[in-house]
Amino acid sequence: MPPYSRRHRAIPLWLVLLALLGLYATYALIRTLSHPLPVEPPQTSDSAINRQIQVFFTTPTLRYPDLPNRRATPPMLRDLINDVSRARTSIDVAAFDLDLAQLVDALIAAKRRGVNVRAVIDSENLSDPSVAMLTGRMQDRRIPVVFDRRAPFMHNKFVVIDGTIVWTGSWNLTENCTFRNNNNALRIESRQIAAAYRREFEQMHTGRFGTAKRSDTLRIETQASNGRIDVYFSPQDKALPFILEQIDHARSSIVFMAFSFTSAPIADALIDAIERGVRVEGVIEKRNAVGTGSVFAQLRMNGVDILEDGNCYIMHHKVMIIDDKVVITGSYNFTDNAENANDENLAIIRDTTIARLFQHEYTNIRQQALEPTRCN
């Protein structure tokens, strides 16, 4: 009998496969530890209010510089264009800045289908050739465009579709804000909310901007799901007292992401929150952290854990998250101009699931602030 029988020499196939699987798993683990992939939050959630709201965040590349051939169309732009393409009756666009050619193409196609398409745009960015060209294309296709030529900004970024869907947030409808800057967008499906935004649009489209606008006596009806969404429009609604109210009610934590932060009342309220034991921390766009009127140094000296952002381009959020259950967001920077001069919109959303999505975005922004992208 040979010293080794066939039974002892043969290695079972299942054992070979198991060994290969183990080697692959080890390789994958090493690769992941060496090149961790960004973890993206879900864009929606399952709570009652989130059947009305979808939350989107831009995902700027961590590689600098941004190059168009590296880009993929983000879900927020894809879904907005899909909504525009499905529109049947009306589309109203209020845009501080607009240079997305694919969106303008979709608006023109909607106009050809018989949809009533209108736009209000701030004149600040008409010096940009791409903005001037695209707004000119809309006018050539008989889309009525009203320009705000005042010194204060028409700073809104919202779209109302078929009196049912609202897109709003910090997201300007531009290449930079879509692919380079950190932004958020909300897609809200609610006739009440849409009616409020459309009434705001109507005022601006008839030439009433800033302090010439009237406060909406029906604003209280824009609450949804037991009052968990409230919207405010500047300057007529005076949103600041409602922001301060939320800060004053904070019990455990306040975190914020701010493109511009010069509001003394909000800064004072955050410092008061620290004094009663609330954890307060935030990230401010680095270009504005040392700008005129910035409260960055004041907040840091008074115990706020505050950082300059680490994006080579722009951290463009205007967000506050309170006690992991309330989110404040919109076009409204934490400034006196946002409160008293510019045309802005702001939403206060009371929902833990939505707050969790924004908290995830804050965690990413803070991590990049701690480990800034290397910029030329």
Image (cartoon, rainbow, N blue to C red):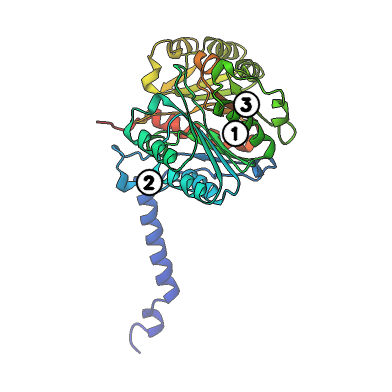
Q: Quadrant of the C terminus?
A: top left
Q: Residue at x 58, y 12 (%)?
A: 269
Q: Which residue is mark 3?
A: 323
- Amino acid type of the residue that numbered disc 1 sits on in the rendered structure: Ala
The part of the image, by quadrant, that contains residue 179 is top left
Q: Give the residue at the far bottom of this rendering.
A: 1
Residue at the spot 53% in from the left edge and 12% down from the top edge: 267
Front position among marks 3 and 2:
3
CA gap, disc 3 and disc 2 = 33 Å
Q: Which residue is mark 2?
A: 33
Q: Are marks 3 and 2 in contact (CB under 8 Å)?
A: no
Closer to viewer: mark 1 or mark 2: 1
Residue 225 appears anywhere in the view: yes
Q: Earlier in the sequence, mark 1 or mark 2?
A: 2
Residue type for callout 2: Leu
List x then y, in percent, for residue 323.
Answer: 62, 26
Between residue 310 and residue 12, name the one nearer to us.
310
Residue 325 placement: quadrant: top right
Dot 1 corresponds to which residue? 355
Q: Nearer the viewer, mark 1 or mark 3?
A: 1
Crowding at dot 1, Cα within 10 Å, few <14 / some 14-19 / many 20+, comes out as: many
Where disc 3 sits, the SS reads loop
- Across and down, in percent, residue 128 comes to 33, 30
